[in-house]
Image (spheres, rainbow, N blue to C red):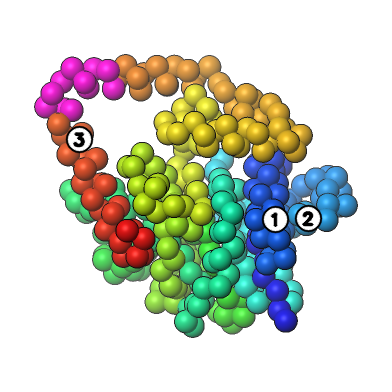
Amino acid sequence: MRKNAIAIFTDAGYFPLAYVLGRAAHDAAGSVADVIVFTDDAALVARYAQDRDVSVRHVDLSGRIPQNAATHSRVTDTTYGRLFLGELLDERYARVLYLDCDIEVEPGFTDIFALDLKGAVVAAATDAGDILRRDGEHADAWRKHLTNIGLAPNAPYFNAGVLLIDLDAWRRIDVAAECFAFLARCGKLAISMDQDALNFVLRGQWMRLSQRYNFQFPFFGLGLDAHCRPLIWHYTGHLKPWIEQLWPHDPVHTERLRAQLAAHGWPDFVAQHCKPEHRKQRLKTRLKAWFNRLRPAKRQRMAARMAARRAHAIEMLRADDHI
């Protein structure tokens, strides 16, 4: 019988996050899937060579990423590693669940492997930024972006941080080659880089995944956790729970992550990400919120905006049969 895998890619800087995610995934998955962390740091591979639960493997993408494939501080060469999963995993594996590093999993998340893909290449959740793109200038800009990358202005668009992949279908398409060809054509128009590329290459070939399996940052703070019961939390955007001073939501996310990191040898990871500028930014945010409370009209507009976002979020969750 062919196997399942859970794959995570990371550089040295994010390795602690990738490793504790891998450990949590293994603890929840048991024999359902092999957990593999790919890194470009050979020293880390040697250090964890004897780990029986999480396989830490070396991946060298130097020379494999075309110059037109942009990178920055949050999108490095290893980010593009997911495109090569068809060749990095051998024929023993029928399916792989790709996870970004900025994720936390709950027991039961591996139920995703029982999903019937119904011929789709991947299952992926609609990008939760859709909550912000429903009307006004955001909607116009988003429709223009979709058109710029070759999609219909009302095309569905998925978040690529959680992907359940049929590896045989992925290989037949040669996803990496198709994505890099897309990036060569689109250049800077592909502002979300490989996520834009995957949405174009897999258009019409992906199945909508429940938001339970990719509960993204725009859903946080809307009071929907109890309705959706997330199995995979995805800290999209620049506000992360390990940047404790800027994290605006339930501190349980920071505390759980801190405990996991400490248990595996990184007790100071969260503290090391506390910067003086974060304190200033947090103070500015609090002062802005305080001044807004003194301006009834502004407060009413903000409340109306949040109500609209919550209503749309509920629509998305209802479409997944979760409410």
Observer-nearest of 94 and 9: 94
Residue 313: say if magenta: no
- The kind of secondary structure element at disc 3 is helix
Task: Check disc 1 and report the residue beneath it.
Answer: 26
The amino acid beneath tag 3 is Ala
Q: In this view, does 306 lie to the left or right of 157?
A: left
The amino acid beneath tag 2 is Asp
Q: Are marks 1 and 2 in contact (CB under 8 Å)?
A: yes
Q: How far apart are marks 3 and 2 (CA)?
A: 47 Å
Q: How far apart are marks 1 and 2 (CA)?
A: 7 Å
Observer-nearest of 244 and 64: 244
Q: In this view, does 122 lie to the left or right of 282?
A: right
- Crowding around mark 2 (Cα neighbors within 10 Å: few <14, some 14 to 19, many 20+) is some
Q: Along the polypeptide, which appears first: circle 1 or circle 2?
A: 1
Count the marks: how many?
3
Residue numbers of the magenta segment? 289-299
- Crowding around mark 3 (Cα neighbors within 10 Å: few <14, some 14 to 19, many 20+) is few
Q: Along the polypeptide, which appears first: circle 3 or circle 2?
A: 2
Q: Which residue lies furthest to the left in this view?
A: 297
Task: Check disc 3 and report the residue beneath it.
Answer: 303
For the point 55% across and 48% down, the residue is 103
Q: Along the polypeptide, which appears first: circle 1 or circle 3?
A: 1
